[in-house]
């Protein structure tokens, strides 16, 4: 809001007004009595109640109080018996919960409006109102009958009637049994479908503004209206209890085990946009896993959706949820003109020259109700913006920060973050990927890039299974490019198939053909990357070398001496004697590489890797003499780069196997 402007002053006035009303009500409750009588208090008896234009209208009879003010229940009708039409705002009506025959005290500053050609005065500004319980009669009624189950008639007034565009005989308010809404909680809980036949409220006017609904219906939820929006994105978010569920007692140590054990307790979410360009995130039901998210994306994205019965979970701003607004910014400006609040909605008044949204409402469905209806049969909306697909080469050249982008790439290797001070279920997973734009360029470095998958990114069951089996193509949708890194964060989705609607954005999306090439180790190699290495063995780190026997059946590395025969080993997991243990080895060798001749290259040898097989064979032939492996040439080895230091000039590698 502009400082000192009319909107800011009005906002302050409304806040003061709400505070005054809440303070007055709290004072009445704490004193457990009607505020002291004073001049100007209007006492009415409700005869009839109906709803019109979100206001509750009560036809009332004005009363006069007997001289015994508070102690007496004697309320007598005035001799002239004036009839009044009293208007109650939605919040006031919800507080009073009044019905026919109830007595209401209306305190100043109420106002009386006299309409031309009307005999019944209208009472407005009824915020300071209180229902009076008339002694034992009311208490008995509350105990015996409970809360009264009232049906409030709804008068639906169309704009055609307001501007007198319809026939005179159609000007009367339409009343129907389907427009009578019960005020008790039991009725609201019984509405379980958004279908127009079983959901009476769906017959009311269909709105196209999220902001208008929130402002007019309140944060607690709206039930009399529906909002028509377009689904821009479908994704899953971790449940509020924690980013990922707790890992089982036996903690997994590899990336495949982590992602298999932690993908539960997620919530299906929609990012929707209305006709005015405003966004909201709708959090639907909780799921046991993200299974089927690809089907939801294909069926729902780009389609129109009707929301009813929503409640505001949070009003968030750009500073609070940068991740959400980075996704919204990728969808801004709209591809088609949108409506402008407060202006004529003629086509020439619609414009896309608007500022990006500065706030967003996070909505959720009422408990136990299905309030979202997607029209899957309808065509894709013109407002929908499919994800623009870029090549990895183009993404690496983006100058901006916190930009959402999408790409189609092959996953070659995955690895779990090795920071030991971070809980296992909150560690990042690194995916090393490549595409045609990197593989088919001669002077492009690197040919493979690392993609960080944050703990808050939800992966579907299908993606998890595919990642742990073999190398294949994945579609990375709405990843975050920030500080020179590609990050899969909240609201990022990994898909096995490219969406039907996606714009190429000028990128070369040719499929990879032939074997994948890795960068060779050189002076430009950085830590947390993969490369190929060739060189000559110049030394072995004997101080850190060791070997240990493992079970040949289950791979258990914690074998014990057999109680019956100390010369044999025993496996607790198999509960059997191990007669042919498999010897595993931890070994580091030093290489001399022509591509980085001035550096010390240290390679960690892993069990059953190419280098391990070579060294183990040479050692066994020479009775495990270290000299037998010196001077031997090795390569090309696929390695993960652990560290790169300049003082001393050393590169730490680990031999790996690609998917």
Image (cartoon, helix red, strand yellow):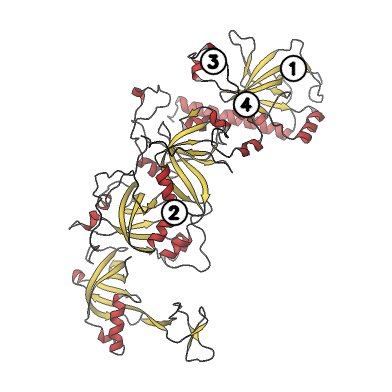
82, above or below 521, in the image: above
Q: Marks 2 and 3: which is nearer the front?
A: 3
Q: Marks 4 and 1: which is nearer the front?
A: 4
Residue 458 is labelled as 2
Residue 177 is labelled as 4
Crowding near the residue tagged with mark 4, few <14, some 14–19, many ≥20 C-alpha atoms within 10 Å:
few
Please give left or right for residue 328 compared with residue 371 in the image: left
Q: Marks 4 and 2: which is nearer the front?
A: 4
The residue at 47%/45% (across/down) is: 269
Secondary structure at badge 4 equals helix
Please give left or right for residue 59 compared with residue 396 in the image: right
* Mark 4 / mark 2, whichever is N-terminal: 4
Which is more toward the observer, 168 or 16? 168
Real-space CA distance between mark 4 and mark 3, rounded to the nearest whole angstrom: 18 Å
Q: On the image, numbered disc 1 is attached to which residue?
A: 63
Which is more toward the observer, 411 or 312? 411
> Measured from the top left, where is residue 336 in percent x and y?
34, 32
Real-space CA distance between mark 2 and mark 3, rounded to the nearest whole angstrom: 54 Å
Crowding near the residue tagged with mark 3, few <14, some 14–19, many ≥20 C-alpha atoms within 10 Å:
few
Please give left or right for residue 132 compared with residue 572 in the image: right
* Mark 2 / mark 3, whichever is N-terminal: 3
Residue 170 is labelled as 3
Real-space CA distance between mark 1 and mark 2, rounded to the nearest whole angstrom: 63 Å
Residue contact at pointers 2 and 3, CB within 8 angstroms: no
> Measured from the top left, where is residue 523 in percent x and y?
22, 65
């Amino acid at each position: 809001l502009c400082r000192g402007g009319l909107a800011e002053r009005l906002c302050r006035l409304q806040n003061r007004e709400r505070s005054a009303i809440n303070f007055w009500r709290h004072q009445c409750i704490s004193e457990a009595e009607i505020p002291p009588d004073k001049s100007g208090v209007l006492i009415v008896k409700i005869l009839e109640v109906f709803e019109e234009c979100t206001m509750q209208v009560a036809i009332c009879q004005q009363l006069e109080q007997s001289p015994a003010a508070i102690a007496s229940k004697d309320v007598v009708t005035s001799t002239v018996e004036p009839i009044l039409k009293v208007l109650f705002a939605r919040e006031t009506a919800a507080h009073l919960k009044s019905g026919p025959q109830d007595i209401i005290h209306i305190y100043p500053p109420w106002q009386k409006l006299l309409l031309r050609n009307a005999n019944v005065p209208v009472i407005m500004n009824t915020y300071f109102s209180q229902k009076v319980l008339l002694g034992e009669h009311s208490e008995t009624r509350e105990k015996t009958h409970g809360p009264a189950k009232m049906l409030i008639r709804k008068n639906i007034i169309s704009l055609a009637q307001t501007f007198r565009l319809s026939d005179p005989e159609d000007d009367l308010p339409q009343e129907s049994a389907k427009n009578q809404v019960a005020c008790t909680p039991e009725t609201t809980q019984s509405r379980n479908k958004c279908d127009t036949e079983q959901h009476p409220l769906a017959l009311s006017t269909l709105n196209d503004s999220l902001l208008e609904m929130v402002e007019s219906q309140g944060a607690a939820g709206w039930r009399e209206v529906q909002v028509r929006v377009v689904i821009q994105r479908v994704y899953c978010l971790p449940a509020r209890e924690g980013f990922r569920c707790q890992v089982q007692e036996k903690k997994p140590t590899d990336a495949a085990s982590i992602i298999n054990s932690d993908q539960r307790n997620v919530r299906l979410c929609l990012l929707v946009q209305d006709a005015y360009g405003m966004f909201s995130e709708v959090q639907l039901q909780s799921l046991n896993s993200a299974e089927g998210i690809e089907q939801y994306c294909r069926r729902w994205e780009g389609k129109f959706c009707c929301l009813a019965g929503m409640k505001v979970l949070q009003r968030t701003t750009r500073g609070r949820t940068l991740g959400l607004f980075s996704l919204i910014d990728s969808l801004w400006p709209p591809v088609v003109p949108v409506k402008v609040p407060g202006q004529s909605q003629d086509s020439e008044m619609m414009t896309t020259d608007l500022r990006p949204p500065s706030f967003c409402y996070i909505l959720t469905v009422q408990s136990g109700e299905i309030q979202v209806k997607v029209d899957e049969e309808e065509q894709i909306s013109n407002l929908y913006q499919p994800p623009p697909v870029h090549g990895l080469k183009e993404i690496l050249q983006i100058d901006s920060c916190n930009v959402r982008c999408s790409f189609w790439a092959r996953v070659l290797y995955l690895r779990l973050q090795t920071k030991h001070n971070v809980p296992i279920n909150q560690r990042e997973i690194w995916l090393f990927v490549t595409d045609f734009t990197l593989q088919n360029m001669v002077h492009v470095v690197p040919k493979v890039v690392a993609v960080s998958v944050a703990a808050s990114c939800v992966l579907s069951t299908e993606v998890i299974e595919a990642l742990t089996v073999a190398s294949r193509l994945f579609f990375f949708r709405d990843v975050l490019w920030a500080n020179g890194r590609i990050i899969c964060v909240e609201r990022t989705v990994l898909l096995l198939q490219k969406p039907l609607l996606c714009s190429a954005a000028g990128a070369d999306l040719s499929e990879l053909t032939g074997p994948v090439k890795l960068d060779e180790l050189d002076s430009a190699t950085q830590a947390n990357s993969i490369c190929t290495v060739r060189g000559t063995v110049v030394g072995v780190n004997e101080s850190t070398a060791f070997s240990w026997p493992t079970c040949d059946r289950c791979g258990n590395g914690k074998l014990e001496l057999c109680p019956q025969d100390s010369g044999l080993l025993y496996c607790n997991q198999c509960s059997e004697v191990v007669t042919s243990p498999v010897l595993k080895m931890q070994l580091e060798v030093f290489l001399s590489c022509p591509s980085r001749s001035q550096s010390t290259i240290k390679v960690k040898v892993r069990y059953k890797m190419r280098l391990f097989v070579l060294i183990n064979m040479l050692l066994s032939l020479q009775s495990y003499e270290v000299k037998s492996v010196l001077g031997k040439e090795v390569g090309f080895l696929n390695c993960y780069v652990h560290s790169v230091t300049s003082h001393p000039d050393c590169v730490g590698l680990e031999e790996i196997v690609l998917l």
